[in-house]
Amino acid sequence: MRYGTCAWAVALMALGAARLLPAAEPSPEERGLAIATEADRRERGYGDSTANLRMVLRNKQGQTSERELRIRTLEVENDGTRSLCIFDTPPDVKGTILLTHAHKEADDDQWLFLPALRRIRRIAAQNKSGSFMGSEFSYEDIATQELGKHTYRWLRDEVYDGNDCYVIERTPVDKANSGYSRQVAWLDKEHYRTWKVDYYDRKNDLLKTLTFKDYRKYAERFWRATRMDMVNHQTGKSTILTWSDFTFGTGLREIDFDRNSLTLLR
Protein backbone atom coordinates (compact mmCIF):
# COMPACT_ATOMS: atom_id res chain seq x y z
CA MET A 1 0.00 0.00 0.00
CA ARG A 2 1.33 3.41 -0.93
CA TYR A 3 1.88 6.01 1.86
CA GLY A 4 -0.61 8.49 0.39
CA THR A 5 -3.44 5.94 0.37
CA CYS A 6 -2.68 4.96 3.99
CA ALA A 7 -2.68 8.59 5.20
CA TRP A 8 -5.97 9.28 3.42
CA ALA A 9 -7.57 6.25 5.08
CA VAL A 10 -6.32 7.35 8.51
CA ALA A 11 -7.73 10.86 7.94
CA LEU A 12 -11.15 9.42 7.04
CA MET A 13 -11.13 7.32 10.20
CA ALA A 14 -10.23 10.39 12.30
CA LEU A 15 -12.99 12.46 10.67
CA GLY A 16 -15.51 9.72 11.37
CA ALA A 17 -14.40 9.55 14.98
CA ALA A 18 -14.65 13.34 15.33
CA ARG A 19 -18.23 13.30 14.08
CA LEU A 20 -19.11 10.88 16.84
CA LEU A 21 -17.69 13.17 19.55
CA PRO A 22 -20.06 15.76 21.09
CA ALA A 23 -19.20 19.45 20.43
CA ALA A 24 -17.28 21.05 23.27
CA GLU A 25 -19.50 23.15 25.53
CA PRO A 26 -18.44 26.81 25.74
CA SER A 27 -17.09 27.86 29.13
CA PRO A 28 -19.18 30.25 31.29
CA GLU A 29 -16.72 33.01 30.35
CA GLU A 30 -17.05 32.29 26.61
CA ARG A 31 -20.82 32.15 26.87
CA GLY A 32 -20.99 35.36 28.92
CA LEU A 33 -18.81 37.22 26.40
CA ALA A 34 -20.90 35.92 23.48
CA ILE A 35 -24.11 37.21 25.11
CA ALA A 36 -22.57 40.63 25.88
CA THR A 37 -21.12 40.86 22.35
CA GLU A 38 -24.50 40.13 20.75
CA ALA A 39 -26.20 42.72 22.98
CA ASP A 40 -23.54 45.26 21.99
CA ARG A 41 -23.92 44.40 18.27
CA ARG A 42 -27.66 44.99 18.40
CA GLU A 43 -27.16 48.35 20.08
CA ARG A 44 -24.67 49.66 17.48
CA GLY A 45 -25.57 51.63 14.38
CA TYR A 46 -28.04 54.24 15.64
CA GLY A 47 -25.66 57.08 14.76
CA ASP A 48 -26.93 59.81 17.04
CA SER A 49 -29.95 60.49 19.20
CA THR A 50 -31.58 63.04 21.46
CA ALA A 51 -34.08 62.59 24.31
CA ASN A 52 -35.63 64.37 27.25
CA LEU A 53 -35.22 63.06 30.78
CA ARG A 54 -37.01 63.67 34.06
CA MET A 55 -35.00 62.70 37.15
CA VAL A 56 -36.77 62.19 40.49
CA LEU A 57 -34.56 61.91 43.58
CA ARG A 58 -36.11 60.28 46.67
CA ASN A 59 -34.44 60.29 50.08
CA LYS A 60 -34.82 57.72 52.85
CA GLN A 61 -37.77 59.66 54.34
CA GLY A 62 -39.61 59.63 50.99
CA GLN A 63 -39.09 63.32 50.19
CA THR A 64 -38.56 63.99 46.50
CA SER A 65 -36.98 66.58 44.25
CA GLU A 66 -37.10 66.72 40.45
CA ARG A 67 -34.75 67.70 37.67
CA GLU A 68 -35.25 67.92 33.93
CA LEU A 69 -32.49 67.30 31.40
CA ARG A 70 -31.83 67.02 27.69
CA ILE A 71 -29.62 64.15 26.48
CA ARG A 72 -27.59 64.11 23.27
CA THR A 73 -25.60 61.03 22.17
CA LEU A 74 -23.29 60.30 19.24
CA GLU A 75 -21.59 57.08 18.15
CA VAL A 76 -17.96 57.53 17.10
CA GLU A 77 -16.41 55.23 14.51
CA ASN A 78 -13.65 53.02 15.97
CA ASP A 79 -14.25 54.47 19.44
CA GLY A 80 -17.11 54.61 21.92
CA THR A 81 -19.71 57.35 22.26
CA ARG A 82 -20.00 61.04 23.08
CA SER A 83 -22.84 62.28 25.28
CA LEU A 84 -24.15 65.48 26.81
CA CYS A 85 -26.48 65.81 29.80
CA ILE A 86 -27.85 69.37 29.94
CA PHE A 87 -29.87 70.40 33.02
CA ASP A 88 -32.85 72.71 32.41
CA THR A 89 -34.49 72.69 35.87
CA PRO A 90 -34.54 73.48 38.77
CA PRO A 91 -33.01 76.98 38.66
CA ASP A 92 -30.11 76.14 41.00
CA VAL A 93 -28.70 73.58 38.53
CA LYS A 94 -29.99 75.05 35.24
CA GLY A 95 -27.21 75.15 32.66
CA THR A 96 -25.10 72.47 34.36
CA ILE A 97 -23.67 70.14 31.68
CA LEU A 98 -21.95 66.76 31.88
CA LEU A 99 -19.86 65.87 28.81
CA THR A 100 -18.70 62.26 28.49
CA HIS A 101 -16.28 60.80 25.96
CA ALA A 102 -16.71 57.05 26.49
CA HIS A 103 -13.91 55.05 24.89
CA LYS A 104 -13.96 51.39 23.90
CA GLU A 105 -11.07 50.40 26.15
CA ALA A 106 -9.21 53.52 27.39
CA ASP A 107 -10.40 55.43 30.46
CA ASP A 108 -13.44 57.59 29.78
CA ASP A 109 -13.09 61.38 29.80
CA GLN A 110 -15.74 63.41 31.65
CA TRP A 111 -16.14 67.13 32.29
CA LEU A 112 -18.75 68.99 34.33
CA PHE A 113 -19.61 72.60 33.45
CA LEU A 114 -20.89 74.61 36.44
CA PRO A 115 -22.57 77.79 35.11
CA ALA A 116 -22.62 79.62 38.46
CA LEU A 117 -18.82 79.42 38.60
CA ARG A 118 -18.32 79.61 34.79
CA ARG A 119 -15.94 76.71 35.38
CA ILE A 120 -15.31 73.36 33.65
CA ARG A 121 -14.24 70.64 36.09
CA ARG A 122 -12.67 67.41 34.89
CA ILE A 123 -14.00 64.26 36.59
CA ALA A 124 -10.89 62.30 37.55
CA ALA A 125 -10.93 58.55 36.97
CA GLN A 126 -10.69 57.88 40.71
CA ASN A 127 -13.85 59.98 41.26
CA LYS A 128 -16.10 58.31 38.69
CA SER A 129 -17.77 56.25 41.41
CA GLY A 130 -19.10 59.47 42.95
CA SER A 131 -22.76 60.53 42.86
CA PHE A 132 -23.95 62.25 39.67
CA MET A 133 -25.69 65.47 40.73
CA GLY A 134 -26.99 64.00 44.00
CA SER A 135 -28.63 61.00 42.34
CA GLU A 136 -28.10 57.28 42.98
CA PHE A 137 -26.38 57.08 39.59
CA SER A 138 -22.62 57.50 39.58
CA TYR A 139 -20.58 59.16 36.85
CA GLU A 140 -19.53 55.61 35.96
CA ASP A 141 -23.19 54.63 35.48
CA ILE A 142 -23.89 57.62 33.24
CA ALA A 143 -21.09 56.72 30.80
CA THR A 144 -21.94 54.19 28.08
CA GLN A 145 -21.14 50.62 29.11
CA GLU A 146 -18.55 49.78 26.46
CA LEU A 147 -17.97 46.07 25.80
CA GLY A 148 -14.22 46.17 26.49
CA LYS A 149 -14.60 47.72 29.96
CA HIS A 150 -15.64 44.42 31.58
CA THR A 151 -14.96 40.71 31.54
CA TYR A 152 -18.02 38.47 31.41
CA ARG A 153 -19.33 35.19 32.80
CA TRP A 154 -22.63 33.42 32.20
CA LEU A 155 -24.24 32.46 35.51
CA ARG A 156 -27.58 30.87 34.62
CA ASP A 157 -30.81 31.17 32.63
CA GLU A 158 -33.78 32.54 34.55
CA VAL A 159 -37.23 34.02 34.00
CA TYR A 160 -37.41 37.62 35.22
CA ASP A 161 -40.60 39.69 35.09
CA GLY A 162 -42.06 37.32 32.48
CA ASN A 163 -38.97 37.40 30.24
CA ASP A 164 -36.77 34.35 29.57
CA CYS A 165 -33.35 35.81 30.43
CA TYR A 166 -29.65 35.15 30.41
CA VAL A 167 -28.06 36.12 33.73
CA ILE A 168 -24.45 37.24 33.28
CA GLU A 169 -21.80 38.71 35.56
CA ARG A 170 -19.74 41.73 34.50
CA THR A 171 -16.42 42.42 36.25
CA PRO A 172 -14.77 45.80 35.63
CA VAL A 173 -11.36 45.75 33.98
CA ASP A 174 -10.40 48.98 35.81
CA LYS A 175 -10.85 47.54 39.30
CA ALA A 176 -8.81 50.32 40.91
CA ASN A 177 -11.24 53.11 39.91
CA SER A 178 -14.59 51.37 39.55
CA GLY A 179 -17.01 51.65 42.46
CA TYR A 180 -18.08 48.05 41.88
CA SER A 181 -16.50 44.65 42.36
CA ARG A 182 -19.01 43.18 39.89
CA GLN A 183 -22.45 43.58 38.32
CA VAL A 184 -25.06 40.91 37.65
CA ALA A 185 -27.35 41.63 34.67
CA TRP A 186 -30.54 40.04 33.33
CA LEU A 187 -30.90 40.22 29.49
CA ASP A 188 -33.86 38.73 27.63
CA LYS A 189 -33.05 36.05 25.07
CA GLU A 190 -35.28 37.46 22.34
CA HIS A 191 -33.97 41.01 21.99
CA TYR A 192 -30.99 41.11 24.42
CA ARG A 193 -32.59 44.01 26.34
CA THR A 194 -31.35 44.58 29.88
CA TRP A 195 -34.11 44.30 32.50
CA LYS A 196 -32.21 44.39 35.78
CA VAL A 197 -28.69 45.00 37.09
CA ASP A 198 -27.44 44.29 40.63
CA TYR A 199 -24.37 46.34 41.57
CA TYR A 200 -21.97 45.00 44.23
CA ASP A 201 -19.63 47.36 46.08
CA ARG A 202 -15.91 46.87 46.50
CA LYS A 203 -16.56 44.63 49.54
CA ASN A 204 -18.82 42.50 47.33
CA ASP A 205 -21.96 43.54 49.27
CA LEU A 206 -25.12 44.34 47.28
CA LEU A 207 -25.13 48.13 46.83
CA LYS A 208 -27.77 49.07 44.22
CA THR A 209 -30.34 47.56 41.87
CA LEU A 210 -31.33 49.14 38.56
CA THR A 211 -34.53 47.97 36.86
CA PHE A 212 -35.72 48.84 33.34
CA LYS A 213 -39.40 49.18 32.38
CA ASP A 214 -41.67 50.00 29.45
CA TYR A 215 -39.36 49.30 26.51
CA ARG A 216 -40.30 50.85 23.17
CA LYS A 217 -38.73 50.24 19.75
CA TYR A 218 -37.45 53.16 17.68
CA ALA A 219 -36.19 53.32 14.09
CA GLU A 220 -37.51 49.76 13.66
CA ARG A 221 -34.66 48.16 15.66
CA PHE A 222 -33.44 50.12 18.68
CA TRP A 223 -35.10 49.34 22.01
CA ARG A 224 -35.14 51.99 24.73
CA ALA A 225 -36.56 51.68 28.25
CA THR A 226 -38.70 54.68 29.11
CA ARG A 227 -38.25 54.20 32.84
CA MET A 228 -35.24 53.24 34.98
CA ASP A 229 -35.40 52.83 38.76
CA MET A 230 -32.15 52.81 40.75
CA VAL A 231 -32.50 51.74 44.40
CA ASN A 232 -29.61 52.06 46.85
CA HIS A 233 -30.01 49.20 49.33
CA GLN A 234 -27.43 50.64 51.74
CA THR A 235 -28.82 54.21 52.06
CA GLY A 236 -32.52 53.69 51.33
CA LYS A 237 -32.40 56.39 48.63
CA SER A 238 -33.62 55.95 45.06
CA THR A 239 -33.66 57.74 41.71
CA ILE A 240 -36.22 57.34 38.94
CA LEU A 241 -35.39 58.31 35.34
CA THR A 242 -38.30 58.82 32.94
CA TRP A 243 -37.31 59.16 29.27
CA SER A 244 -39.36 60.79 26.48
CA ASP A 245 -39.12 62.20 22.97
CA PHE A 246 -36.40 59.88 21.64
CA THR A 247 -35.24 61.07 18.20
CA PHE A 248 -32.61 59.37 16.01
CA GLY A 249 -30.52 60.71 13.14
CA THR A 250 -30.61 64.35 14.18
CA GLY A 251 -27.31 65.26 12.48
CA LEU A 252 -25.15 65.69 15.57
CA ARG A 253 -21.40 65.85 14.87
CA GLU A 254 -18.30 65.20 16.93
CA ILE A 255 -17.61 68.93 17.17
CA ASP A 256 -20.93 69.28 19.06
CA PHE A 257 -19.28 67.34 21.90
CA ASP A 258 -16.13 69.45 22.17
CA ARG A 259 -14.99 70.34 25.69
CA ASN A 260 -14.24 73.92 24.67
CA SER A 261 -17.86 74.43 23.52
CA LEU A 262 -19.41 73.69 26.91
CA THR A 263 -19.64 77.33 27.93
CA LEU A 264 -21.56 78.14 24.72
CA LEU A 265 -24.18 75.34 24.89
CA ARG A 266 -27.80 76.20 25.66
Image: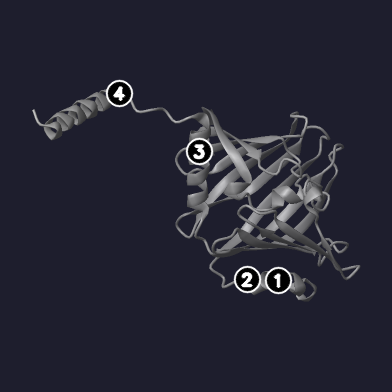
Q: Which quarter of the rendering shows the N terminus?
A: top left
Q: Which residue is mark 3?
A: 188
Q: Which residue is mark 2?
A: 254
Q: Residues within 10 Å of mark 3 (few under 14, many from 20)?
A: many
Upstream in sequence: badge 4 or badge 1? 4
Q: Disc 1 vs disc 3: Cβ atoms closer than 8 Å? A: no
Q: Amino acid at mark 2?
A: Glu
Q: Amino acid at mark 1?
A: Asp
For marks 2 and 4, give the one nearer the viewer. Answer: 4
Looking at the image, residue 229 lies above or below residue 252: above
Q: Which residue is mark 4?
A: 21
Q: CA distance from mark 2 to mark 4?
A: 52 Å
Query: In the visual, does 172 lie left or right of 135?
Result: left
Q: CA distance from mark 3 to mark 4?
A: 31 Å
For marks 1 and 3, give the one nearer the viewer. Answer: 1
- Residue farthest left in this picture: 1
Upstream in sequence: badge 3 or badge 4? 4
Q: CA distance from mark 2 to mark 1?
A: 7 Å
Q: Residues within 10 Å of mark 1 (few under 14, many from 20)?
A: few
Q: Secondary structure at mark 1?
A: loop
Q: Amino acid at mark 4?
A: Leu
Q: Position of residue 200 (x, y in %)?
A: 72, 33
Q: Disc 2 vs disc 1: Cβ atoms closer than 8 Å? A: yes
Q: How many marks?
A: 4
Q: Disc 3 vs disc 4: Cβ atoms closer than 8 Å? A: no
Query: In the visual, does 63 lie left or right of 42?
Result: right
